[in-house]
Amino acid sequence: MNKISFKSHRPVTQAAAAALAFGALVAMAPLAGAAGAPPTLRPDGVGPVRVGMDTFQIRAALGEKTVKLPDNAPDAQCFYLRAQQYPELRFLMEGGTLRRIDTREPGMSTADGIRRGDTLAKVQALYGERLKTESSKTGGGKDWTLTVQDPDGVHATRFETRDGYVEHIVAGFTEQVENPGCV
């Protein structure tokens, strides 16, 4: 039987070393796949970013600078940020705090698996009576805004539909999720 010695450790058989190496690879596999996987939007945030953080905390969590979007209103108290790590997201900052996260990108999924392009029926089937449903003011009766309150009572997710399909997803603090723009 062949033995492999590691400095300051007992001898280990080649089979045991191979098993350890295989175990390490299996344990790391989800991490490798996660790097290319699109992020999941949750009612309380995305990745390491949580609603309630300030700009400095967001930058620290992401390990990168954020960029204030040029299409913002001149109001310094309410603006959107964008991060290179999450180009499909817009982070709504109000009063120096992240209040909600918006996306219109098809690759972004909520924690419950809803994406842009999913049907109104899929959202209704998933959330059922938990949904607060309102007709869109601009959709002529066929566009809807559907909001689901998170069980924590603090966060919510809103789905805006057009012609029966999800077009826009917003997640964050309930007050900002239920009100377009800044409160």
Image (cartoon, rainbow, N blue to C red):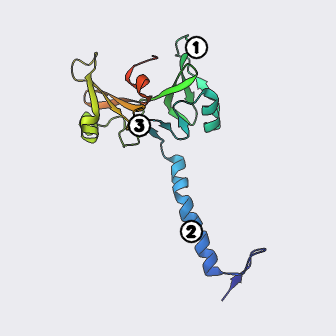
The C terminus lies in which quarter of the figure? Answer: top left
**Which quadrant holds residue 48?**
top right
The residue pinned by badge 3 equals 152
Q: Secondary structure at mark 2?
A: helix
State the residue lying farthest toward the left: 141
Q: Secondary structure at mark 3?
A: loop
Q: Are marks 1 and 2 in contact (CB under 8 Å)?
A: no
Residue 23: image tag? 2
At a point 37% along the width and 23% down the height, the residue shown is: 178
At a point 28% along the width and 37% down the height, the residue shown is: 123
The x, y position of residue 21, in whole percent, is 61, 70
Within-10-Å neighbours for mark 2: few <14, some 14–19, many 20+: few
| In the displayed structure image, the side of residue 137 where residue 70 appears, left or right | right
The residue pinned by badge 1 equals 76
Q: Nearer the viewer, mark 2 or mark 3?
A: 3
State the residue lying farthest toward the bottom: 1
Residue 13: image tag? none
| In the displayed structure image, the side of residue 6 where residue 139 appears, left or right | left
Q: CA distance from mark 3 to mark 1?
A: 30 Å
The x, y position of residue 176, in whole percent, is 43, 23
Q: CA distance from mark 2 to mark 3?
A: 37 Å
| In the displayed structure image, the side of residue 44 where residue 57 appears, left or right | right
Within-10-Å neighbours for mark 3: few <14, some 14–19, many 20+: few
For the question of whether residue 91 can be seen, the reply is no
Q: Are marks 3 and 1 in contact (CB under 8 Å)?
A: no
Q: Earlier in the sequence, mark 3 or mark 1?
A: 1
State the residue lying farthest toward the front: 153
The amino acid on which the numbered mark 3 sits, given as a three-letter code, is Asp
The amino acid on which the numbered mark 2 sits, given as a three-letter code, is Gly
Q: Nearer the viewer, mark 1 or mark 2?
A: 1
Q: Earlier in the sequence, mark 2 or mark 3?
A: 2
